[in-house]
Image (tube, grey):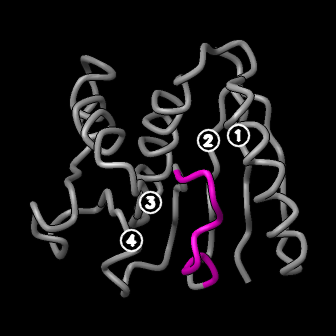
Amino acid sequence: MPRVDFYLQKNGAPGARLRLCCRLVERILAEGLLILIHCPDRGLAGQLDELLWTFRDDSFVPHGLVGATDAELTPVLISPDGTPEDRDQVLINLDLAPPPFAARFRRICEPLDPDPAVLQAARQRWTHYRAQGWEISHHDIPR
């Protein structure tokens, strides 16, 4: 059964969830875990791919888009559809809907920002996860 963590950057601008995603990736990667970032929006996936290379001068996050990198050698994958199926440690969800494949992961991270559409969709995902009986936590993140 997955553990779900919602992370809200309250003081961030709309769109700040991508930077928050980068911070989460860096922290989780330091734990030695494999990460799949679910991002079905191609434009957003491209922005995140670029941001993971540049969000901090002293950071290196080995990552790539599924289909454009060797999944076996890449600890952080950005996927539009949950592939590869053998990735099951940590899911970071950037979709507004709950991913249909979420149950296979041990941990699900939901980075949020104060955008009203993002928050409304997060409430619906929270309700969905709670209906599954999954453990859910909320964390307010300072800038």
What's the CA distance linking mark 1 and mark 3?
16 Å
Kindly identify the residue that appears in the image at 10 percent across and 62 percent down: 69
Count neighbours of disc 3 (C-alpha within 10 A) and say few if under 14, some if 14 to 19, many if 20 or more.
many
Q: Main secondary structure of the magenta part?
A: loop
Do residues under tags 2 and 1 come within 8 Å of each other at their CB atoms? yes
Kindly identify the residue that appears in the image at 21 percent across and 65 percent down: 66
Mark found first going from the N terminus, 4 or 3? 3
Which residue, given by chain and number where applicable, does mark 1 sit on? 7
Mark found first going from the N terminus, 1 or 4? 1
- Under mark 1, the amino acid is Tyr
What's the CA distance linking mark 3 and mark 2?
12 Å
Do residues under tags 4 and 2 come within 8 Å of each other at their CB atoms? no
Magenta segment: 95-103
Q: Which of label 1 and label 4 is nearer to you? A: 4
Do residues under tags 3 and 2 come within 8 Å of each other at their CB atoms? no
Kindly identify the residue that appears in the image at 74 percent across and 28 percent down: 116
Mark found first going from the N terminus, 2 or 1? 1
